[in-house]
């Protein structure tokens, strides 16, 4: 995870040692969208393995505690064989699937001391995390 992180997002890759991977499937009768969230990662690699989907666009809306947090609005169509690499603290969502199926492999690259908001740091100090 670290060499990839250093090559693509060097300002965020310091200390990456753990990689957690999983697949996500969007299809009728299962997950058809995903609300706005951030990942539990320092850097995320999201690879589209297969897609016959319509809709289900990947939307980014800014990085937490960054000037783009409230102003960024980027939408991407996830294409088979293509990957998206982003900072885990980047707000993103998946729009409504309108047909077909899409499968993604997601790799979360983590540093031992991941970025935390002031609220999260406070919660950890108070034993809430």
Image (tube, grey):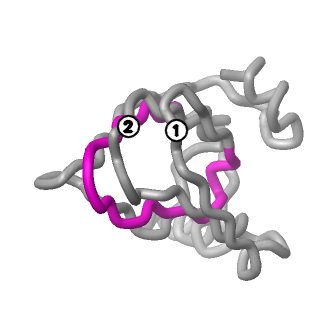
Q: How many dots with numbers? A: 2
Instruction: Return the disc, 2 or 1, that comes first in the chain's sequence.
Output: 2
Predominant secondary structure, magenta span: strand
Q: Decide whether residue 100 is among the magenta residues.
A: yes
Q: CA distance from mark 2 to mark 1?
A: 7 Å
Residue 87 vertical placement versus 4 (above, below) = below
Q: Secondary structure at mark 2?
A: strand
Where residue 5 sits in the image (x, y, percent)?
Answer: 75, 29
Which disc is residue 79 wearing? 1
Decide if residue 37 is on the left or right side of residue 53.
Answer: right
Residue at 54% across / 51% down in the picture? 77
Residue drawn where x is 53% and y is 70% of the image: 123
Residue 70, label in figure: none
Verify whether residue 80 appears in magenta. no
Q: Which residue is mark 2?
A: 51
Q: Nearer the viewer, residue 85 or 95?
A: 95
* Residue nearest the viewer, comparing 65 with 30: 30
Q: In this rendering, is residue 62 above or below 101?
A: below
* 123 horizontally vs 56: left or right: right
Between 94 and 51, the one lying in front of the other is 51
Q: Which residues are magenta?
A: 86-107
Give the structural element (helix, strand or loop) at label 1: loop
Q: Are marks 2 and 1 in contact (CB under 8 Å)?
A: yes
Q: Residues within 10 Å of mark 1 (few under 14, many from 20)?
A: some
Q: In what quadrant of the picture does the N terminus appear? A: top right
């Amino acid at each position: 995870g670290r060499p990839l992180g250093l090559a693509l997002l060097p300002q965020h890759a310091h200390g990456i040692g753990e990689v957690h991977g999983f697949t996500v499937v969007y299809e009728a009768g299962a997950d058809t969208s995903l609300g706005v969230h951030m990942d539990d990662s320092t850097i995320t690699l999201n690879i589209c393995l297969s897609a016959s989907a319509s809709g289900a666009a990947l939307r980014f809306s800014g990085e937490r505690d960054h000037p783009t947090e409230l102003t960024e609005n980027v939408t991407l169509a996830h294409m088979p064989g293509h990957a998206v690499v982003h900072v885990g603290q980047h707000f993103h969502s998946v729009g409504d699937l309108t047909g077909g199926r899409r499968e993604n492999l997601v790799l979360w690259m983590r540093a031992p001391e991941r970025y935390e908001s002031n609220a999260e740091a406070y919660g950890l100090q108070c034993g809430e995390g």
